[in-house]
């Protein structure tokens, strides 16, 4: 029986009038632009190149005058080039995979960690959470923002936290049952796997979960339905990205009709990914964020490459912050596999360093038993094709190990005969995604 009820963590902010939100955004935007202009050389140079001075940015209508920030900037200025605070004031570094093997990192001041914790606290409240709850965190802990993000939010609402981290499914379920967890935070695919295992074990009546916040990867309404049935919970969507702080940038309320964006901390825009022009509310395009409270590493007009649309209509829950739709796709070729961002270029760079294979490869993504799988098919060179079985097995192991260490995920490797992978005249298609995400 679902028991989650609508609660608002910070009604003064979450339900403020649109005019008041806008005023707050204008003021915070001005401050942030002044900060990055003074402290971050890259931004100062780019603004100078465009002939824009901090005093030219008065309201969010002036945003379009500012340059974009790209994921490649985080790689190019790795590790500290985009930090606006001195390292002595940075209390945390979190990270995520970048477009090459090098991770991208984000630096947080105490103020940033506090803001991030509150964003997740709002999400947990919206999922009916509070101090009486026992929150099982089954997102990975570490550089990835999922584990610590959920942990801090759950601590902030005064709940009891079980920091399980991801994996070890049997133990997760044992603890969930024995400790009486009432909320679950993990990726939706892992939650589904947990749910299926609970069902298989005949433990459905013995689990006390009422709701959960699930994110870090794309999912669908069908997956929600399935998950809600499996665990008898309200399954809420939560969105975020390391570059803007982590999970909690946007979250669903029990209306389950879009995710409220924490507009007191970020300004969201939707742009046409081809012309780069801003699009009106309701139109699908690329989501772009500007930080307006971060002091560690504030990013200006950061291109997420995530595709969605925005809805400014008031919500029945009482919150006034704009809602974003589910992410329907990406404008680049990033895949999210078991919550880990994977770029074909990372795999390609591994393959290029292995002797005996050609640069012809295909990546096949699937979802088996609710778990994402990635198979790398790669052509052997003519010479290697006639080699011994043990020689071929050695290549397979080398590829597997190198991908594991560069990308951080286990993959299946299939070595195929020369000239069997399809060739393309235009852009090569390197990825076949068989997951039925249903967009
Ligand atoms: P990371 O910084 O490693 O946490 O990855 C952030 C990316 O994960 C985002 O840019 C999205 O592509 C994806 N992501 C995170 N949350 C969601 C969500 N709720 N729905 C769809 N995609 C998501
Ligand atoms: Zn709402």
Image (cartoon, helix red, strand yellow):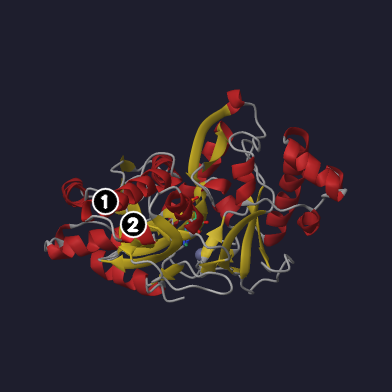
Name the residue carrying label 1.
391
Q: Is residue 28 left or right of residue 128?
A: right
Query: Residue placed at 88% from the left, 48% from the top?
Result: 51
Quadrant where the N terminus lies? bottom left
Q: Is residue 339 left or right of residue 277?
A: left
Please determine whether, in this image, residue 430 is positioned above or below residue 245.
Answer: below
Q: Position of residue 210 (x, y in %)?
A: 29, 59
Q: How many C-alpha atoms fall within 10 Å of the one at disc 2: few (<14), some, or many (≥20)? A: some
Frontmost residue, 77 versus 302: 77
Query: Residue placed at 40% from the left, 49% from the top?
Result: 354
SS of the residue under disc 2: helix
Q: Is residue 262 left or right of residue 217?
A: right
Q: Position of residue 116 (x, y in %)?
A: 52, 43
Residue 3 visible somewhere in the drawing: no
Name the residue carrying label 2.
384
Q: Position of residue 361 (x, y in %)?
A: 43, 63
Query: Residue placed at 21% from the left, 49% from the top?
Result: 180
Q: Earlier in the sequence, mark 1 or mark 2?
A: 2
Q: How many C-alpha atoms fall within 10 Å of the one at disc 1: few (<14), some, or many (≥20)? A: few
């Amino acid at each position: 029986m679902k028991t989650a009820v609508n609660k608002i963590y910070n009604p003064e902010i979450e339900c403020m009038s649109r005019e008041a939100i806008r005023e707050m955004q204008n003021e915070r935007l001005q401050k942030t632009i002044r900060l990055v202009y003074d402290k971050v050389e890259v931004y100062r140079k780019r603004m100078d190149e465009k002939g824009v001075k901090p005093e030219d940015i008065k309201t969010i209508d002036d945003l379009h005058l500012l340059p974009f920030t790209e994921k490649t900037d985080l790689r190019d200025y790795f590790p500290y080039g985009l930090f606006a605070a001195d390292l002595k004031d940075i209390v945390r570094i979190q990270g995520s995979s970048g477009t090459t093997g090098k991770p991208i990192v984000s630096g947080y001041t105490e103020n940033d960690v506090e803001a991030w914790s509150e964003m997740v606290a709002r999400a947990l409240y919206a999922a009916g959470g509070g101090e009486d709850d026992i929150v099982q965190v089954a997102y990975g802990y570490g550089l990835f923002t999922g584990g610590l993000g959920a942990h801090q939010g759950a601590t902030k609402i005064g709940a009891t936290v079980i920091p399980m981290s991801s994996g070890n499914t049997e133990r997760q379920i044992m603890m969930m049952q024995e400790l009486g967890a009432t909320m679950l935070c993990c990726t939706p695919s892992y939650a589904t796997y947990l749910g299926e295992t609970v069902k298989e074990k005949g433990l459905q009546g013995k689990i006390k979960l009422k709701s959960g916040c699930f994110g870090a990867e794309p999912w669908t309404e069908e997956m929600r339905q399935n998950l809600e049935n499996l665990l008898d919970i309200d399954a809420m969507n939560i969105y975020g990205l390391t570059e803007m702080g982590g999970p909690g940038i946007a979250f669903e309320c029990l209306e389950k009709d879009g995710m409220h964006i924490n507009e007191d901390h970020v300004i969201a825009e939707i742009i046409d990914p081809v012309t780069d022009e801003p699009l009106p509310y309701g139109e699908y395009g690329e989501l772009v964020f500007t930080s307006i409270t971060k002091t560690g590493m504030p990013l200006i007009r950061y291109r997420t490459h995530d595709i969605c649309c925005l809805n400014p209509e008031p919500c029945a829950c009482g919150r006034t912050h704009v809602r974003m739709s589910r992410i329907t796709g990406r404008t680049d070729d990033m895949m999210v596999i078991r919550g880990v961002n994977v770029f074909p270029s990372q795999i390609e760079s591994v393959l290029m360093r292995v002797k005996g294979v050609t640069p012809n490869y295909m990546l096949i993504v699937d979802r088996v038993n609710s778990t994402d799988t990635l198979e790398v098919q790669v052509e052997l060179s003519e010479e290697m094709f006639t080699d011994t079985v043990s020689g071929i097995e050695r290549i397979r192991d080398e590829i597997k190990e190198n991908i594991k260490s560069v990308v951080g995920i286990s993959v299946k490797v299939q070595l195929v005969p020369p000239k069997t992978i399809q060739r393309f005249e235009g852009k090569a298609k390197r990825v076949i995604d068989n997951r039925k995400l249903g967009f």
